Image: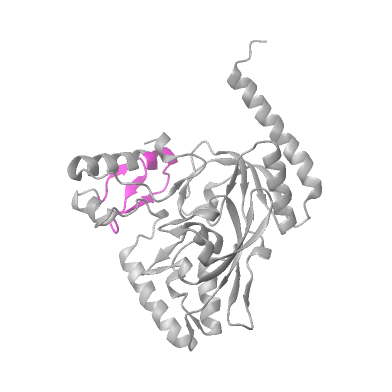
Amino acid sequence: MNATLNEIGREQREAAFHDLIATVRPRLTAASKLAEREVLAPKTTMRVGGPARVYAEPATVDDLRHLLLEANRRGLPVLLLGRGSNLIIPDAGVDGLVLSLAHESWQKFEPKPDGRIWAGAGLRLKNLCGLATKAGFKGFEFLEGIPGNVGGALRMNAGAMGGWMFDVVEEVHLMSFAGEVRVMPKAEMHVDYRHCAELQAGIALGAHLKPAATAGAEDIRRQIDVYQKKRVESQPREPSAGCIFKNPPGTSAGRLIDELGLKGERVGDAEVSTVHANFIVNRGHATSADIIGLVRQIRARVKSARGIDLEPEVLLYGQEWRDVL
């Protein structure tokens, strides 16, 4: 009788999670994974963050659909986790269902007779680039150093070395959060800088990609080597989440931060990289709170000195930046 509304809400949420697990587990194929309070930090490139209340790796389209429908039926939040390369997971973790297409069934690379390539959403970009090179397909070289998978690259329209994921996309297969599978040509999708509108409300299952041309593997490899050399020289090796801030119009976030002498600035074990100022690196035992604190400091300095509001590019997983900045 003395329970607060918050306590009642937590009890109802816990009951919903227990019911979700009890309902879904018997329906999933044996190859699927379903776990409670799975620690997420090791699944990210920044190596920070707490657990997921429920974590699942569905092995089939039907398994994915069951998980989505049952979570939606109970009003439980659903989040996608790819290779964890462009996000910061809060120290407290995520009070929701975290889905990862990490099972090998989502990692297919299939050249088609019409010259296109089918790439599953769980296929690592590095593997996509390597397999395309081996098959003599040009156009994917810029993806080699991006530490993500195809699904995440589609969702964020990932880019590097002047290339963008949707430069090589013909159509995307996706599942809505209501469990409906759709096939969408690129021309019907709304894509811009670090954003794909349709994949904010859906899950990429994979895509048909179009190579720019065909060539010998050695020729393609030479271009990859050029990109690798540039990346090694310009990006840090320590754990990071990639570029922290979006580039403001007419300039680069890294240049602004560098010009203000913020390289090496630290909060706890989170540090502004001395190699590239738009990277925050984990010096060993950084927490999410350390990183958020450092993001606040950088933004305040840039705003004070240049009047520019830097907007985070990385995602604050399960939360909104506006709630913590």
Q: Which residues are magenta?
A: 263-292
Q: Position of residue 108 (x, y in %)?
A: 64, 70
Closer to us: 307 or 55: 307
Q: In front here: 114 or 31?
A: 114
Q: Position of residue 10 (x, y in %)?
A: 63, 26
Residue 97: name its quadrant. Answer: top right
The C terminus lies in quadrant: top left
Position of residue 297 measured from the top left corner of the image (x, y, whole percent) = 29, 39
* Residue 65 horizontal side relative to residue 287, left or right: right
On screen, residue 187 versus residue 102, left or right, reads: left
- Front residue (pair 172, 270): 172
Q: Residue at x 68, y 47 (%)?
A: 68
Where does the image place residue 223, in percent across and percent down from the top left?
A: 39, 80
Instruction: Check the image and report above or below for 303 versus 8.
Output: below
Residue at the extreme right? 26
User: Could one spot residue 186 in this view of the protein?
Assistant: yes
The verdict on residue 50 being magenta is: no
- Asked if residue 314 is positioned above or below residue 146 in the image, the reply reads above
User: As displayed, is residue 198 above or below residue 2?
Assistant: below
Residue pictured at 18% horizontal, 43% vertical: 305
Asked if the magenta segment contains residue 266, the reply would be yes
Task: Give left or right: position of 2 versus 191.
Answer: right
State whether residue 166 is above or below residue 95. below
Q: Quadrant of the N terminus?
A: top right
